[in-house]
Amino acid sequence: MLHIEAPFEQGNIRICDLLGQVLREHHFTGGSLQIDLSDWERGGYILYGENMEGEKALPLKVIIAQ
């Protein structure tokens, strides 16, 4: 699982930019992303990705620094 830390003050757009950069670095070339808000755990959300074939990509844990 990848851990991404993003300052809360940056807002959602910056966090999405950061996630996009990390996903590209890990060769996630397209598909859908979803953050399950019920998965809040220790200050972070679990974000699941699916590639274009509908296969699950590596889960990412998004940690919102406060």
Image (spheres, rainbow, N blue to C red):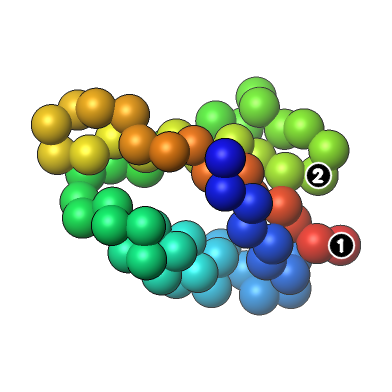
The residue located at (57%, 40%) in the rendering is 1
Alpha-carbon span between mark 1 and mark 2: 9 Å
Q: Are marks 1 and 2 in contact (CB under 8 Å)?
A: yes
In the drawing, does residue 58 fall left or right of residue 37? left
Residue matched to label 1: 66
Residue 55 can be seen, yes or no: yes
Q: Quadrant of residue 25?
A: bottom left
The disc placed on residue 43 is 2
Left or right of 20: which side holds 42? right
Residue at position x 55%, y 30% in the image? 36
Q: Is residue 56 above or below residue 20?
A: above
Give SS at disc 1.
Answer: loop
Of the numbered discs 1 and 2, the one sitting upstream in the chain is 2
Q: Which mark is residue 8?
A: none
Q: Quadrant of residue 22?
A: bottom left
Binning the other alpha carbons within 10 Å of mark 1 as few (below 14), some (14 to 19) or many (20 upward) gives: few
The three-letter amino acid code for the residue at tag 2 is Gly
Residue plotted at (50% across, 69% down): 18
Position in image of residue 24 (x %, y %)? 32, 64
Tell me the quadrant of the picture where the C terminus can be found. Answer: bottom right
